[in-house]
């Protein structure tokens, strides 16, 4: 699935509620999910980590929607910019 398609699905499902909550409080939810992912990784619970990876991605796309950021575009730009890519 392309990032733009997933971002649109997230927008259609969650934008109204997330927009009412606002970007600041939505960012707090995102941070909570990152914390849950970190805990799952630290505990070695791979199944829980998988679920938390998905949660973190959905909240990231939600934040991008609220800030009107096209994630397909920014990821493509990131990959083209060799300064940001890890050296091998």
Image (cartoon, rainbow, N blue to C red):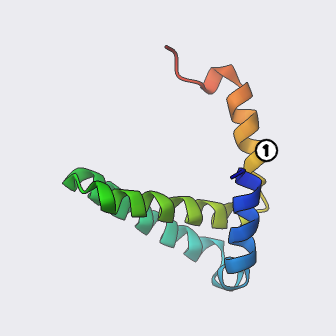
Circle 1 crowding by C-alpha within 10 Å: few under 14, some 14–19, many from 20: few
Left or right placement of residue 66 versus residue 30 in this view: right
**Residue 58 in the image, given as x and y percentages of width and height:** 58, 64
Name which residue lies at 43% across and 66% down.
Answer: 33
In terms of depth relative to the viewer, which is nearer, 45 or 86? 45
Is 28 above or below relative to 88? below
Label 1 sits on a secondary structure element that is helix
Q: Quadrant of residue 40?
A: bottom left
Q: Quadrant of residue 84?
A: top right
Q: Quadrant of residue 35?
A: bottom left
**Residue projecting furthest to the left:** 43
Report how many numbered discs are placed on residues in the image.
Answer: 1
**Which residue is label 1 attached to?**
73
Is 22 above or below relative to 44? below
**Residue 42 in the image, given as x and y percentages of width and height:** 23, 51
Name which residue lies at 71% across and 61% down.
Answer: 7
Is 65 above or below relative to 42? below
Name which residue lies at 76% across and 55% down.
Answer: 4
**Residue 32 in the image, given as x and y percentages of width and height:** 42, 68
């Amino acid at each position: 699935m392309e990032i733009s398609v997933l971002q649109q699905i997230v927008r259609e499902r969650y934008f109204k509620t997330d927009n009412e909550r606002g970007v600041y409080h939505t960012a707090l939810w995102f941070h909570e999910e990152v914390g849950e992912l970190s805990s799952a990784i630290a505990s070695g619970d791979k199944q829980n980590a998988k679920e938390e990876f998905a949660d973190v991605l959905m909240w990231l796309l939600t934040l991008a929607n609220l800030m009107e950021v096209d994630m397909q575009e920014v990821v493509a730009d990131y990959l083209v910019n060799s300064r940001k890519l890890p050296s091998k």
